Each structure stands twice: as C-alpha cells, then as structure tokens.
Amino acid sequence: MYEVDFVEFPSTSATASGEFFARAFGRQVTPYGPDYTDVRAAGLTFGFRADAAEQPGAPLVTIRTDDLAAARTAVEAAGGEVTAEPFAFPGGRHFHFREPGGSELAVWCPE
C-alpha cells in the first residue's frame, strides 16, 4: 500500500502556522516543540518546520507504506535516488528520495 498522507512545509514559525490552521479551519494541532507542528486535515497531515537547518526547500510530499525496506527497493529500482537514509521520528521511520524529474519526496512507515 502506498498513499500520500503527509506534506511538510517550511515555516518561519511552526507555532504560528499551527495556530493559524486551528483558528481558521478548526484543525487539530500537535506541537513538537517550537520548531515543528503537525496539523491534521481530513486524512492528510500538514507538518510545519521552522528550523532553517532542516527545512525542506519546497513542500515535501510524504508517502505512507507498511514496508519501508520494500519501498526503498522500489524507489531505487525505478530510478529514484535516496537523499536521506532511513531515520526515526516520533511515530515511525522515513527516508527521502529524489525522483528522476528532480523533485524530492519521502516515504514513511509507522512504528
């Protein structure tokens, strides 16, 4: 199973981004400190990253899977390049990759 369920955005203030979506659209917000906030939105989660050293250069679309190793194999076999090795984060593990057209995306798997 592969399904887009997360998009991460750069933000100058993760707290302000989360508060905006809570006030404007009544969305559930989960802050993970001052530099990261998740906003749940109808089956899709938006992440806002304020730490400039870790911000994506553009929105980072993240694909959910049940098998991270198999997803990596599929990405590489299809011509994708892994740009960040698998690593843990609250809720699971993920890796980043660049598809042949140049866009960076990520794949994650819950714990």
Image: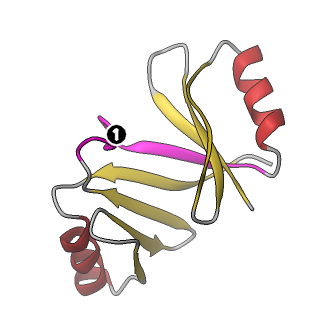
**Quadrant showing the C terminus:** bottom right
The image quadrant that residue 47 belongs to is bottom left
Which amino acid, by three-letter code, is at mark 1? Pro
**Image location (x, y in percent) of residue 43:** 57, 69
In the rendered structure, the answer to whether residue 50 lies left or right of residue 102 reads left
Residue 8 colored in magenta in the image: no
Classified by dominant secondary structure, the portion drawn in magenta counts as loop
- The secondary structure type at the circle numbered 1 is loop
In the rendered structure, the answer to whether residue 76 lies left or right of residue 34 reads right
In the rendered structure, the answer to whether residue 35 lies left or right of residue 47 reads left
The image quadrant that residue 29 belongs to is bottom left
Q: Nearer the viewer, residue 61 or 37?
A: 37
Residue 61 colored in magenta in the image: yes
Q: Which residue is mark 1?
A: 56
Q: Residue at x 57, y 65 (%)?
A: 90
**Image location (x, y in percent) of residue 76:** 71, 18
Q: Residue at x 43, y 42 (%)?
A: 60
Q: In this picture, which residue range is highlighted in magenta?
A: 52-65
In the rendered structure, the answer to whether residue 69 lies left or right of residue 7 reads right
Residue 55, compared with residue 104, is above or below; it is: below
The scheme the figure's colours follow is secondary structure
Residue 91, compared with residue 6, is above or below; it is: below
**Image location (x, y in percent) of residue 46:** 42, 62
Residue 83, compared with residue 6, is above or below; it is: above
Q: Residue at x 16, y 56 (%)?
A: 12
Q: Nearer the viewer, residue 25 or 52?
A: 52
Residue 111, compared with residue 107, is above or below; it is: below
